[in-house]
Image: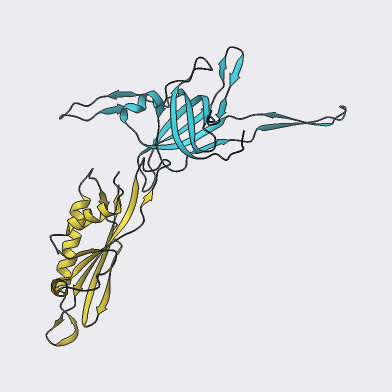
Amino acid sequence: MDVSRKNIYSYVASLFTSITKNIYRIKIPETFNSDMLTNGFILLTLDDIKDHSEFSLETYAGTRMTVEYYIPSAKVGDVSGIMNTTKFDNAQQSIDNIISAECAKSNQTYNISKDGILSSDDYYSNGSNSFFIYITSFIIQL
Amino acid sequence: MAKKTSIKLMDFEYGPVRAAIATAPTYTKCQGLLKGFTLSQEDPNATKIDSELLANPYATIYKGTPIVFKFELVNFDLEDLPPLFGGTYTAGVAGTSGATYDAPDDIYTTNHEWKVSFQKGLDSMIMFNGLTMGIIKKEADGALSYSVTVTAETLIIGDSKYTYRLTDKTEAA
């Protein structure tokens, strides 16, 4: 059983490389590059790993990974408040498709399952840059 | 001997019931247990005798109950199942089929010696003659498991009777 947190982060990051190359863990980076400001970035956070074994790691363990996709806000024309939702919709669809495809696999090093109810959104501002955030999560069994 | 608290299981093993008390069997490890392994013994049955005529009018007779191990086994090889729960194991064929386990048509019990080793405190506890029984189950969000109950029976060797034994760690010479 591979319960190394860094390996789990790497595994999840490898799922999303087709969407963006800007994937970060735990905290938002202090400085943003131009690609992040144009195309957004993904932030991964892993919950505590819970082991269900009487003898350490002899049975199975589980944890939850939260994926946050920061998508730069863009308005339609010059009207503030009307959001250009295309990027956001595409990002949400891409992430959901990747997670669904991974959920369908069996007997992998990490088996993931999506509960479907825990997706949300939020808003984040950094100086003159603002992002709309798509938040979803899934359970990893290992 | 120093007093000590025994805590945290380190090994859980089983083997054939021993024929001579001094000869320990060869154990097989049984480690893929969910949290919640318990060792318990119910309060003994008490019979109260009240008599007006005896010098001591109140008397109580106790009759003991067996020790019981309970645990959920989730990480196992199909090959491990017949010795514990009966049934038939058939090995798989590489590239063609997986191994199979056909369960018996009813509850099947076996007798084994069970040994629990502690990480801290005493070395181990041995149940000499454990009646072993398992039922298959899966709880919500849990793994497929065998819910195993091991009930101590008396081991009789010659004129001596044994149920369980606690063993301390070997002291440094």
The residue positioned 23% from the left and 64% from the top of the image is A24
In terms of image quadrants, where is residue A135?
bottom left
As displayed, is residue A63 above or below residue A135? above
Residue B103 appears in the figure: no
| Chain shaded cyan | B
In terms of image quadrants, where is residue B109?
top left
In terms of image quadrants, where is residue A12?
bottom left
> Is the N terminus of chain A in the top left, top right, bottom left or bottom right quadrant?
top left
The residue positioned 56% from the left and 27% from the top of the image is B165
Residue A32 pos. (x, y %)? 19, 73
- Residue furthest to the front in view is B173
As displayed, is residue B159 above or below residue A68? above
Looking at the image, residue A123 sits to the left or right of residue B83; the answer is: left
- Residue furthest to the bottom in view is A78
Looking at the image, residue A16 sits to the left or right of residue B135; the answer is: left
Residue A59 pos. (x, y %)? 36, 41
Residue A28 pos. (x, y %)? 26, 69
The residue positioned 58% from the left and 12% from the top of the image is B158
As displayed, is residue B139 above or below residue A139? above
Residue A74 appears in the figure: yes
As displayed, is residue A44 above or below residue B41? below
The residue positioned 15% from the left and 78% from the top of the image is A84
